[in-house]
Amino acid sequence: MSIERCCGNNKTMSGHFFLIAEKSKLYFTFQDQAEQFFRSGHTNNWAVLVCTSRFWFNYRHVANTLSVYRSVKRLGIPDSHIVLMLADDMACNPRNPKPATVFSHKNMELNVYGDDVEVDYRSYEVTVENFLRVLTGRIPPSTPRSKRLLSDDRSNILIYMTGHGGNGFLKFQDSEEITNVELADAFEQMWQKRRYNELLFIIDTCQGASMYERFYSPNIMALASSQVGEDSLSHQPDLEIGVHLMDRYTFYVLEFLEEIHPASQTNMNDLFQVCPKSLCVSTPGHRTDLFQRDPQNVLITDFFGSVRKVEITTGALALDRDVAALESKFPEEELATEPLKYAEQLPVAQIIHQKPKQKDWHPPGGFILGLWALIIMVFFKTYGIKHMKHVF
């Protein structure tokens, strides 16, 4: 009997050890999943999107920037965390055959301007000085919140730039330029002032790789559309609009981003391969030596998406299912809400396409004078000048 009891106790103890091992395994699996979710170490995302070109023939640069703007908004970054800088207003350009639109695909399939674009810096506000002030936070106190980059040391920042450039510089509106040294020093100021956790820099311009050669601050990953000595080429000419709609590199990057969703596990190594030389004609480049993490472990949504605020807990939360009892705690006046009332007006589409309202017809002044002249001519022909004394 003692042997049986001993064997029984051993079985019981082994069962307990098995349960403890299973619980420990589940706990560590749960902890690994939590660490995997928060592995980037950031708590918020920001985007600074810059088009530096003016004039109608640079239509594609505005379309590039607005297309990236559309993608990051679709993946969850709100307008309050996006600084959009457009050097020209192509949507309202007199040459635009479709006012209030900017298209990025042939046959006008996709309007990237939309109805909810919030441009923070436009036209002559897009300068090298203003761009550097946005990055470093050295802006006047009167600057509105929408024009500020309010990032911190837990922020992942996407900086996208497009325009005309050369070896070591990017032009702003054909009147000034920013050099790779100035850009590198601005990023160093951001790091010293704890304005970012990780930074992704993307540039689509001729000889774009020269713009990240001088970077020396940590946690920066950079991508460019072309190497030193190469041109970044345009894509998708449209005969009706009369210009190219996008640049090749940005077009294929955005085609890649269209397949990304907020829960996607696609990493940065996949982004490096989206535009080979056979498609871009130029040779895209990237730099990762300053970045602490392996690009294979960096999700696309770490920069192009938003951070979902969650709190992971091991215990169950009891929710009050008695909604009626909950509502009885508040007076009806507090629960009742009046719908917002707006001035009655037509939607924008109807305003654009509606026919002009017909006005009451009034004869023009020239018509009256012509009628009197005709009456006088008939009178002279009928009665002659000798009868004029009877009229006057």
Image (cartoon, helix red, strand yellow):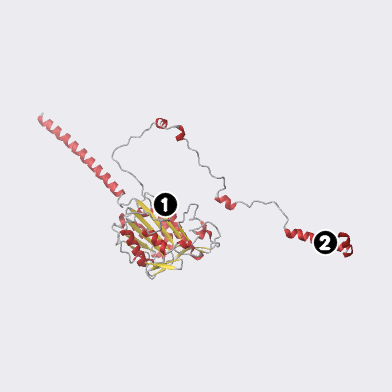
Q: Within 10 Å of the Cα at label 1, are there few (<14), some (14-19), or many (20+) other Cα atoms?
A: some
Q: Could you tell me if the residues under marks 2 and 1 are in contact, i.e. CB atoms within 8 Å?
A: no
In which quadrant is the N terminus drawn? top left
Q: Which residue is mark 1?
A: 80
Instruction: Report the front residue among 371 and 284.
Output: 371
Q: Is residue 6 above or below residue 234?
A: above
Q: Is residue 145 visible?
A: yes
Circle 1: element type:
helix
Residue type indicated by callout 2:
Ile
Could you say which disc has been placed on residue 376 in the image? Answer: 2
Instruction: Report the front residue among 154 and 209.
Output: 154
For marks 2 and 1, give the CA distance. Answer: 73 Å
324 displayed left or right of 311: right
Query: Residue 143, position in %: x, y?
Result: 42, 56
Q: Is residue 258 visible?
A: no
379 displayed left or right of 9: right
Figure quadrant of residue 334: top left
